[in-house]
Image (cartoon, rainbow, N blue to C red):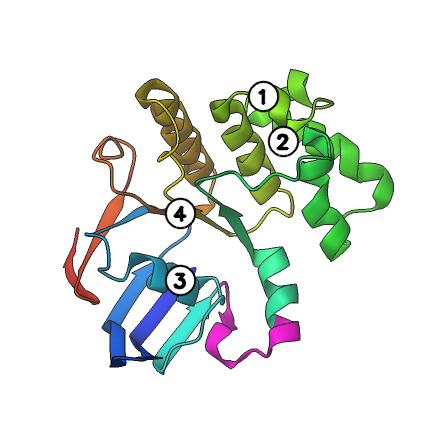
């Protein structure tokens, strides 16, 4: 069964210069435990495709099915609940709340979705921080961590509710090459555990770690290997 099933998705935006089509009839299927890289030049439609998969935006036509849900049919309230339980998102700039400790940041999705009993949330956060290799940073504020450590904390937060899908938008773009490889190895391990990982990337260093690649050009799939 596919975790992601995108069917003939087209997305057109109204702009002051007239209609702009960001995606053109894109179809994509991804199964459990795959590590998929989405590549292409700037403006090729990568971010728009990710926004379709995560329910941040809706297709003009076509269907988006993720983790058993028809995402394109959900209203905003249902989308928020669905996303909180089924999708973990990792950003290029980490997006950790600066006034909360690292452990508290990881607990946030559990608090939002009420997915674990309150007494279990901190132990789970510590377990996830151990998994990504920064358990000793749990009670520090994000500003005390290096960029690589902050990205690991963001990955732990994305895994808080044990989602079937992890989406990462340029997650290594703000890291040095050695730290980027460590993060890619971490994603590969997460995928090997059965979580589907989708990563938007410009870099070529992901090659040894991914299981498949979708290349976009001018809003259409130009290659899928």
Furthest residue to the right? 119
Question: Gap between marks 3 and 1, in whole Å?
Answer: 34 Å
Label located before the other in sequence (3 or 1): 3
Q: Is residue 142 magenta?
A: no
Question: Gap between marks 2 and 3, in whole Å?
Answer: 25 Å
Which residue occupies 50% across, 68% down? 68
Quarter occupied by residue 85: bottom right
| Residue 106 seen in this snapshot | yes
Q: Nearer the viewer, mark 3 or mark 1?
A: 1
Q: Are marks 3 and 4 in contact (CB under 8 Å)?
A: no
Which residue occupies 52% across, 52% down? 164
The residue identified by callout 4 is 169
Q: Which residues lie in the magenta part?
A: 67-78
> In the shown orientation, is residue 88 left or right of residue 210?
right
Query: Would you place residue 22 above or below residue 140 in this image?
Result: below
Quarter occupied by residue 127: top right
| Residue 115 seen in this snapshot | no
Q: Are marks 2 and 1 in contact (CB under 8 Å)?
A: no
Label located before the other in sequence (4 or 1): 1
Q: Are marks 3 and 1 in contact (CB under 8 Å)?
A: no
Pinpoint residue 80: horizontal percent, then vertical percent. Answer: 63, 66
Q: Are marks 4 and 2 in contact (CB under 8 Å)?
A: no
Q: Nearer the viewer, residue 86 or 104?
A: 104
The residue identified by callout 2 is 128
Mark number displayed over residue 4: 3
> In the shown orientation, is residue 196 left or right of residue 16?
right
Q: Nearer the viewer, mark 2 or mark 1?
A: 1
Q: Secondary structure at mark 3?
A: strand
């Amino acid at each position: 069964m596919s975790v992601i099933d995108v069917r003939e998705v087209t997305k057109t935006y109204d702009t002051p210069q007239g209609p702009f089509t960001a995606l053109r009839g894109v179809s994509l299927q991804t199964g459990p435990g795959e590590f998929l890289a989405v590549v292409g030049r700037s403006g090729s439609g990568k971010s728009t495709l990710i926004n379709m998969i995560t329910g941040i935006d809706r297709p003009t036509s076509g269907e988006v099915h993720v983790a058993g849900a028809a995402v394109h049919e959900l209203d905003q309230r249902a989308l928020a609940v669905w996303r909180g339980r089924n999708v973990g998102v990792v950003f290029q700039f980490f997006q950790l709340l600066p006034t909360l400790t690292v452990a508290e940041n990881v607990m946030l999705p559990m608090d939002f979705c009420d997915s674990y009993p309150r007494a279990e949330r901190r132990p789970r956060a510590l377990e996830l921080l151990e998994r990504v290799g920064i358990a000793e940073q749990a009670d520090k504020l994000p500003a005390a961590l290096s960029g690589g450590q902050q990205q690991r904390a963001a990955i732990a937060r994305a895994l808080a509710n044990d989602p079937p899908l992890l989406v990462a938008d340029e997650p290594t773009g703000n890291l040095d090459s050695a730290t980027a490889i460590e993060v890619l190895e971490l994603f590969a391990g997460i995928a090997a555990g059965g979580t589907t990982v989708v990563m938007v990337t410009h870099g070529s260093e992901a090659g040894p770690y991914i299981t498949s690649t979708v290349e976009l050009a001018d809003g259409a799939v130009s290659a899928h290997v």
